[in-house]
Structure formats: C-alpha cells, structure tokens
Image (spheres, helix red, strand yellow):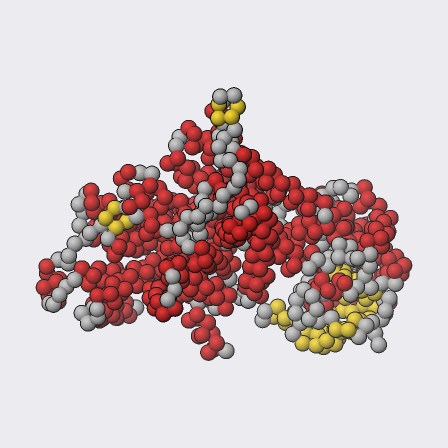
Amino acid sequence: MRKSKALSALTFLAIGLFLLGLSNFVDELRVYQGAQIAVYVIAISSIILLTGYSGQISLGHGALMAIGGYAAVLSYTYWHLPVLLAFTVGALAAALGGFILGMAAARLSGPYLAGTTLALAVGLPSLANQFHILGGEGGLSFDIGEAPKWIANKTGGDFTQYKWFFWVSTVCALVTIWFIKNLLQSRFGRTWRAVRGNPSAAALSGINIGRSKVLAFTVSSALAGLAGALLAMLLGLVAPMAFTLTLSFTLVTGAVLAGVTNLAGSIVGAVVLVVIPEITDVVATHLGGSEKITANLPGLITSVLLILTVIFAPNGPKLHIRKKVHN
Amino acid sequence: MSALDVKDLSVSHGAITAVKKLSFSIEQGQLAAIIGSNGAGKTTLLRALSGLIPSSHGTATWNGKSLLGEKPEDLVRAGIVHVSEGKSVIPELNVKENLALGGIWRKDKKDVAVATEEVLELFPRLRERLQQSADTLSGGERQMLAIGRALIARPQLLLLDEPSLGLAPLIIEQIFEAINQLRHRLNLTVLLVEQNAMSALKIADVGIIINVGSLVTSGPSKELLADANLRAAYLGY
Amino acid sequence: MIIIDTLLIGLSSGAIYALMALALVLVWRSTRVVNFAQAGQAILSTYLGYEVMNRTHSYWISIPFAIVGGAAIAAFIDAVILRSLAKRSHKGSVSEIAPVIATLGLLGLIRSLTGMIWGNAYVQYISPLSGKGYMIGKHTIPFSPQNLIIVIGALLVMGIFATIFKFTNLGLALRAASFQPEISRLAGIRVDRIRTIGWAFAGAAGAVAGALVTPTTYLSPNSLDLLLVSGFVAAVIGGLDSLIGAVLGGLLLGVGFAFILQYIGASVTFSAAFIILIVVLFVRPRGILGSKVGRRDA
C-alpha cells in the first residue's frame, strides 16, 4: 500500500518534471495554452469530484471560481500576501462559499440544486458592479510578477512570465489530481461512492449523508476557488466578464466530455476545451467569416459536443469505447 | 383458433427472467384466471401483453394479430385494455375526469356518453362522487373507477391485475360479481390475474396456475378447485 | 402613494416572471426536467419577432410570429432531442442529470446561433406604446402603456391556459399525462405527443414573456438570463408543480423585488432573490401550492 503510494507520487513527479522541461521547447502561445489546460484540469476535476463521485450537480462552479479569484486578488493587493498564500486564501474563501451552498445543497434534490447553483452563476458575478472594492465591470488587475530568481536561474535560458504561469498552474494541477486521487481512496471517497450508489443503504449503515455531501461540496468548491485564482493570474485580472454563465457551462461540458466518473478524463476534457477555440479560429478564418461567426463558433461547437455526448455517450466518450470493446 | 394465444412467451426484468416460456390460450368470451403467489410473474405477464414492457421471446396474438411490440395506446384502440395493479386511477383528477380519460381518444362521443352512463348505472357510488377527487375514494371505489374507465373504452379483451388487492372480503365479492356480470353482458374476454385464487376461480371458466414465471397447470376452473393437491400447494386454502 | 407605485412596478415585472415560471412548470410537469434552455428559446423567438418587425414595421404583427415560433422551437426540442435522450437513457452515472445537461447544451447552442445570426450587440425591439408612465393629476405613476400591455398579455395567456386545462380534452390529457404517464398510456393517451404539446405551450408562454418585456429593455443573446433565474425562483415559490402557484409565485416575487428596490436599493436585488430561493427551499420545499398528493409510485 505505502509502496504504491510512493510509486504514484513518483509518477506524478516524473510527469511534472517532463511537462516543465517541455515548456522550454515550445513557443509562448503553446506555453500559455498549457497553463490554461492545467487550470481547466483543476476546475473540471472539482466537478468530477462533486458530480461523478458525490452525485450532486453544480451549474455554479463559475461563481465559485469568481469567489476564489476575487479573494486571491484582494488578499494579494490589500494584504500584500505572497502569491501562493493568496491562492490559498482564494481556495479557502471558495470553500467557505461552497460550505454554505453545500448546506443548502444537501437538502435539495436534482432540479432544485441545478436551479439554485444556476442562480448563483448568473447573479454572483454581477455583485462586482455593486461594491466599489470589487472594481466594477472593469475588475481588478492581478500581476503576480516574474518568477523568483532561484527558479529562473536554475532553468537557464529566457524564463518568461507565461512560462512562470505554466509552472505554477501545472504544479497546482498535479497536486490537485494527486490529492483527489488519494481522497477518493480514503474513507471519504468510499463514503461518497456508497451514498452515490445507494443512499438508503448508506444511511442504514450509519453514514451521515448530509455531512458527506456538504464535505464533497466544500472540497470541490475549494478546488474551484484555486482554479479561479489561477485563471485570474492567467488573465492578469478579475472581472465579471471572466466568470460568466458560459464559464460554468464550459466546465460542465468539460466534465461530461471527460466522463464524469473519470478523473484522468479531466485532462481530455481540458484539452478539448482549449483546442476548440483554436480550431474554430482556423475554420472561421478559412471561411472568411465575420466577427459574429468567429465570436460564437466556439460556443456553438462546445454546446453541440455537449448535447451529442449526453445523447450518445452519457458516461463520457472514453468509457463508451471501453464498453464496446468488452461487448 | 383461440382468441388470445400466448406461445413460449419469456419476459425479462434486467437479469431476471420473470416469465419463462409460458404458453396458454383463451377462447372468445371466456374469463381466465391466472393464479400465482407474489413474484410468480403475473404482473409482468400482463405488462408485456399490454405493451408496457418488451418481451424477449415467444409470441402473443389476439384474434391472429400480434400484440408484442405494439404501444399500449395503440392496443387500447384495438380493444385491449389493461387495468394495472393497485387501483389504477389518477388521484390528482376527480372521478368525472378519471372516467372521461377512458373515452378521450374515441371519435364516437355519443357512445362515450352511453358507455359512461352504463358505468354509472353499474357503480352508482361513482355517480355520487363525480366531483370528488379520486384521492378521497375508498379502495373499492377506486377499483370500480378503474374498471369503469376501462369499460368506457369499449374493450374486447380486458386485462385485470389483482382487482382484489387490499380490499375487504365483502368488497372483493362485489367487485368480482360485477366483473362476472359484465363479461356475460358485453361478451368480454377477460384475463384476470389474482393471488386470491378462491374468488377468482369461482367466476372463471379456466384457471392457469403459474409459479416463478412458468406454467404449473391449466384447465377448467372447476377441476382445479376440486384438485386437492393443487389446493394445498398453490391455492392456499 | 409610493406603496401603490411600488405595487404597480411589481405587478408588471411579476407578470413577466409568472409567464416564465409557467413555461418552466409546464415542462417540469410533463417531462420532469427544469428546462434551462427556456431562456434561449424565449430569446430566439423574440429575435424572430424582431426580424418580422423589421420587415413589417409592426410590433403587433410580430408578436404572433414570435409566439408560433416559440411553440415550434419547443416542440422541436422535445420531439427530437429529449425523446432520443429518453430512448437512450441507460442506467449510468449521468443518466439522472442527462436531461438537465442537455437543456444547458441547448441554451448554449441557441445563444451561439442567435449570436451568429444577429450579433452579440444590443438591439432595440420597439413597441409603439409609450414607456412613459400614465399621469394621474400631476403625479406620473411608474406604469406605462407598455406595462399595461404586459399585464394584459400575461393575463390573456393565463386565461387561455386555464380554459384549456380545465375545460378541454386536450387539457385533461395534459394533466393526466403529467401526473401519471403510465396510467395515461393505458387509458389510450399518446403521452409522447401530449408531452410535446405541453412543451409547445411552454415555448409560447416564454415567447410572450420575451416579446412583451424586451421593448422595456434591449435584446441580446443573453438578455433573458436573469429572467430565467427569476422565473425559476417564482416557480419554486409556487411549488414547481402548480400552474396557479407559478402565477402567484411570479407576482409575489415581482412585488417583493419592487419593494426591495424601493426601500433597500438595487445592490441587494440579486442577493435577495438568492436568499428568497434558499429560504423557500428550506422552509417550504413544496412551495406555497406544491401538490399535496404525492406521486405514490414514484
């Protein structure tokens, strides 16, 4: 048991070093997209944890990301916290929000929970316009600065800011997946699966279903908050525009594409989400499309993918293929 | 050729085969009682015959036409009406509306009115409660309402699932008496599924005894009632 | 005087919330799905109205087009997307949430489509009626001819629905199919078809809401998102299952918002909606008029 844990930690370390090394050999745009993928991986895994393992739906993770993003930026700007600590504050703030939401969620069944979280996703970002400290529509800028000298010097070469973003988000993503993986194998993970599979049996065997659901919501929200803080870092700001309803939908799409019970699938989902705009850009340019088409093509493709996936491969494309092979 | 002909019929519930290679037939105008204990596959059989669930094997025909693979709403139009288990009424609607459902698809509105009147003659208690919500009815009244609704569709084959379930003995007798009268008056063919073997066999022409999805025996109900071994093993009295 | 003014504001916005809530409840009753695509459907039908108005220069002609369009879009969505989803609903981790996710996908799809066709910028869908409040003596009340038509339109829709549901065979079939689909099939009702008609009614109600409210604001691919949330809150207040509840919920929410806006300020409107939603769900999850009769076999 302990040996396999050490082994898996080693694997993660190896993947991490490989990715970080890779960042030296590709151009800036790809490095930035790599960082985007890492952020999506975190956000999508937070939904997989919630929906796939604890059986709760959230259409409001964009709002939880907003909480994380704003909290990180505010604590960085006003309290002058170190970046990593600011990220932690972001995660904790979102966890608090998620805890409160989870308290409500534990008592709500599917449609009510979906609607409530949707209300949060639509409404919460607009709060930024109401409070001066949140910077209104324009938002607040967020500059985490260059990489520390000791890292930049060790790697040699030109250590750009994008590369620094990539390093930070990749490390966070790896730690997140490693954390969730272990969490799912722990007592909590087993409890979630039990509740998901058969709530009444779980209750009979002494599991406190409410507590288990709230915990899942809290952990998931903390991860969403971290993703929000990282997104703010990538964008260089937090603003209502960054955390729209579309973001919440995108995350659900990513999770469905990943196969909601497939943690490793979060990488597939994240890559697809980053690649789609890239492809549609090329397509739109080739077609000589107007700005209307270019701006809306990614949304169109994502939505169509989402609909097709739930109709034809509701357990995620990957699982679907595996099933076919078995048959 | 028999009116209702079931051959080698198998029906599965996921991994469980609830009806296994069952064969039986009923003549026009007969009342057949399907007897079996809880879990014998009786309800599953009726649900397959009325199109609610698919069958996995075998055939079932009504006057030569296959029943399997048809939708319940089409079978109703062809005269095959299923009164499902547990007083199949809609509690959110009142008695009048529940009755109206029986003829909602029919073009001949005059005959719907005639049929409704006949049902109200047969079950006068329903007339007293026309405006009441079906939720407020007693178990026996609900069963009357469910059968009444089925009659308004002018059925030829009536599939009745445990009309006696949860009713007091006196009410059961009334309901069965009504069923018996009806089928003679309207020349109905009736497939009656029952756990209450005694009451059912008393009014039935033939009895079909099934156990865990398979046929045990079938024959004229009088003979079944007289068979001491069967009585001990399956009829439970 | 201020109280009456506030009530009037609430009445007009409440009528719109009620229409949206009606649309959500109609679909919920027939399909057991909260149809998040409803905001998109209403937007698309409003754009249809906008397009017709641009050609005919008549707001009044454009409204029936929007309504028929809204009904057709809804029927199409149910018959094509949701029916094939139901056919393929495997027992799987996602099967329970698949319909909800499909409606989300549809919302995204419709938004992108409208954005592609009409652009993301705000456009005006103008009513010939004045948006200026009536004068009573020297006092201008915050209730304009357009507000009046909103209330009348909403009442008309509700009246038509009530008549259909209470007095026609179609209405009886709609109610029966939503309460007990299986028994309804055994009674000979073509439940699939009836369900699609229910969706079409919902689509029409949403279209009326969109076509009536848009002249008071502006039109863009996501200009009805907040209305979707208000409609949902109103539907939950009403019990999600009850058509009358949806109307009452909408009016209560409209009046409640108006008072909050008047006495506390715009900054808390969203928080208030959210808090109202949570409180209702905690205190009275069945809503004020949720069905007392449980679905016994569900």
Residue with the most extreme right position: B185
| A179, A299: nearer the viewer | A299
Drawn side of residue A319 relative to residue A2, left or right: right
Q: Residue at x 49, y 43 (%)?
A: C126
Note whether C38 is above or below A255 in the view shown. Answer: above
Residue with the most extreme top position: C137
| B102, B159: nearer the viewer | B102
Q: Residue at x 65, y 74 (%)?
A: B56
Note whether C36 is above or below B17 in the view shown. Answer: above
Q: How many marks?
A: 0
The image shows residue B32 at horizontal and vertical percentages of 81, 66
Note whether B51 is above or below A102 in the view shown. Answer: below
Evaluate whether residue A272 shows in this view: no
Which corner quadrant of the image does residue A124 belong to? Answer: top left
Drawn side of residue A193 relative to residue C181, left or right: left
The image shows residue A251 at horizontal and vertical percentages of 38, 58
The image shows residue B176 at horizontal and vertical percentages of 83, 56
Which corner quadrant of the image does residue B147 belong to? Answer: bottom right
Evaluate whether residue C60 shows in this view: yes
Drawn side of residue C63 relative to residue B115, left or right: left
